Image (cartoon, rainbow, N blue to C red):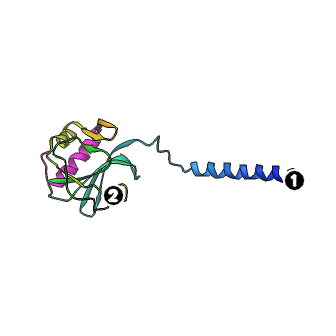
Amino acid sequence: MFKIAIPAVAALGLIAFAAQSRATDSGFDAAAAPMGWHLSHEGSLAKLAYGVGNSDQLALMMTCEPGQTQATVYGDVQPASPRLIKASMSTAIDPLSGGLADERRISVRDPALQQLARRGRLAVDAEAGAFELTATAAEQRMIGDFFAYCGSDRV
């Protein structure tokens, strides 16, 4: 019995180790991927997001259409502004999680967003507390393009 049990256990251990190694060898190291600001367009909708580029790992996303002066905000991180308002009940699908969204709106002229466009800093609130998201000079130009697209060329 031991002649069969010992090799069988060893084979199962090798199979489990190989499967675990294969699962962790995806070629994408989320810990090494930097977070930053990204701008994209989907039809007429502009999306400004803070997260890992080309992934679903986003902390914050703001969307708007041309000429709007309000941006819709999604994510676990929200701009620290008393003017951030809950826009609707949780009925829309959250583009970040795929679940029901808690849609919030904020004016693109809000002082918190003006600080982001002018100085590359956005004060935010999250479950972990308050902190600040920063933008590089190149990201600031992209952020300015987002606000101009939304209908406010004077952020």
> Which residue is label 2 attached to?
95
Task: Give the distance between the C-alpha atoms of the residues marked 1 and 2, in whole angstroms.
Answer: 56 Å
Whether residue 150 is in magenta: the answer is yes
| Residue drawn at x 12%, y 46% as measured from the top left | 154
Task: Classify 121 as above or below 109.
Answer: above
| Residue drawn at x 27%, y 64% as measured from the top left | 43
Dot 2 surroundings within 10 Å: few (below 14), some, or many (20 or more)?
Answer: some
Left or right relative to 21: residue 147:
left
| 142 and 110: which is toward the camera | 110
Task: Classify 101 as above or below 78.
Answer: below
User: In the image, which residues are magenta?
Assistant: 133-155
Whether residue 105 is in magenta: the answer is no
Left or right relative to 12: residue 67:
left
Left or right relative to 48: residue 114:
left
Quadrant in which the C terminus appears:
top left
| Residue drawn at x 15%, y 57% as measured from the top left | 68
Say which element carries label 2.
Answer: loop
Q: Which amino acid, mark 2?
A: Pro
Residue 130: x percent and y percent? 28, 36
Residue 3: x percent and y percent? 87, 51
| 139 and 61: which is toward the camera | 61
Marked residue nearer the N-terminal end (1 or 2): 1
> Which residue is label 1 attached to?
1
The rendered magenta stretch, by its main secondary structure, is classed as helix
